[in-house]
Amino acid sequence: MIARIAGCVAVALALPAFAGPPHEAMGARKSFSPYRVHNLSSLGGTDGSGNSINNQSLVAGYSTVEGDTARHATLWLYGFKFDLGTLGGPNSNVAWPVKNTRGLIAGIAQTSMPEPLGENWSCSAFFAPSTSTGYICLGVVWENGQIRALPTLGGFNGFATGANDKRQIVGWAENTVDDPTCIPPQRRQFRAVLWGPGEDEMRELPPLPGDSTSAATAINDKGQVVGISGACGTAVGAVSAEHAVIWEKGRVKEIGDLGGVAWNTPMAINERGDVVGFSNVSAEDGDAFNAQAFLWTREKGIRGLGTLPGDSMSQALGINERRQIVGLSCTAGFASCRAFIWENGVMRDLNELVEPGYADHFYTANDINDDGEITGQAVLAETQGNVAYLAIPTKHRGKSSHSASRSHAATPLPAAVRQELLQQLGLSQARFAK
């Protein structure tokens, strides 16, 4: 099966990437394409998510296996799906946008080895709840038909997020230091890591002075890396994301926030160096989640993108070269959420832009490529299960364009879907800002 993946990737790489008009040429025109939507089939379970799409239209993310006892990293390509497998444990996932177009996919996978310290580790937020802990989890790459574990900094666990076309991979890994800023069951300190381009190459990316931990979330082909710096915490957001940072030319620099002291998290960077993510909006929130989407540019610094009408929280998750931004916008406590696309200063509900006939509800838009194709997660109208989707803008394909008129302003999330969002942020037992 892995050999088939390599062949499909090779076919995809032979196809020309769409070269869209530059952002400057678009001016202040507030236009949005209607989208033709394809739900992507699962590996037998009822839960799936598209988390990454590159310029060859390869969608990667996860799907649950039959019985929903485990999530496996999954690749979708032109109607075909491929199980990317694990390191011997139950779960794996491509949890972040991976922009590599040369046959390399980065993600996380459990081994069959028990976790000796009893830590939950960062990976547990992205795995099936019933099997999310108990095993060592490592950052991995899938390349040349093989899965390969990435080394740590001496500790047991690691996490890989993004990869560029120069075979550089970023993420974070544990070292051997018992960090007093960790919140049990987390014990070990972790630091941002840059792996590659050689298989034996790795480099630690330090936190800001005074911080104990760091994590890298995305990298572009220029080698610019973005991520977080802060305290250890639970190894999932919150105080570990006290500062949003960028590493370039061997130095780490803070890029700012929207006023909060936690959850200041870059999620993606394009080739222009534009960064998107989310940030708490008030220091009074402390480490309670009350974040909104942001865009950072070198020219204008950081600015909030707001929310869709009626919502109070948002997260920007992906960006392309045109500065089209995608993410999700939610009411308090994630009671209801909607996928959005932001362009030229305007945020729109993606649900309102699909062609007629599509009945399911987009609650996340996780990534967007330079052709404007979007992937994310939708709730099925009939079963209330989760499904990965691919949304293709029709006006770039020579199709007739007309937008749907349906409204999803107050669509409550099913309990299982809401719990998944909370799990990814480590908020299952946490309080929200009032």
Image: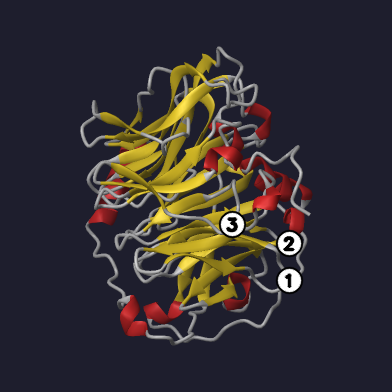
Q: Which mark is residue 259?
A: 3
Label 3: few (<14), some (14–19) or many (≥20) C-alpha neighbours in 10 Å: some
Q: Which quadrant is the N terminus positioned in?
A: top left
Seen in the image, is 282 located left or right of residue 246?
right
Can I make out residue 306 in this image?
A: yes
Marks 2 & 1, CB-CB < 8 Å contact: yes
Identify which amino acid the numbered label 2 is placed on: Thr
Task: State whether residue 37 is above or below residue 424.
Answer: below
Left or right: 432 with respect to 71? Answer: right
**364 or 298, nearer to the observer:** 298
**Amino acid under label 1?**
Gly
State the residue lying farthest toward the top.
116
- The residue that label 2 is drawn on is 331
- Picture residue at 56% right of the left edge, 50% below the top: 49
At which x and y percent is residue 47?
A: 63, 46
Q: Is residue 40 above or below residue 103?
A: below
Question: CA separation, marks 3 and 1?
Answer: 21 Å
Q: Position of residue 38 (x, y in %)?
A: 52, 64
| Tally of numbered discs | 3
Which element carries disc 1, helix, strand or loop?
Answer: loop
- Pointer 1 residue: 310
In this view, the residue in front, 431 or 119, is 431
Are dots 3 and 1 in contact, CB under 8 Å? no
Disc 2 to disc 1, C-alpha distance: 7 Å
Contact, mark 3 vs mark 2 (Cβ under 8 Å): no
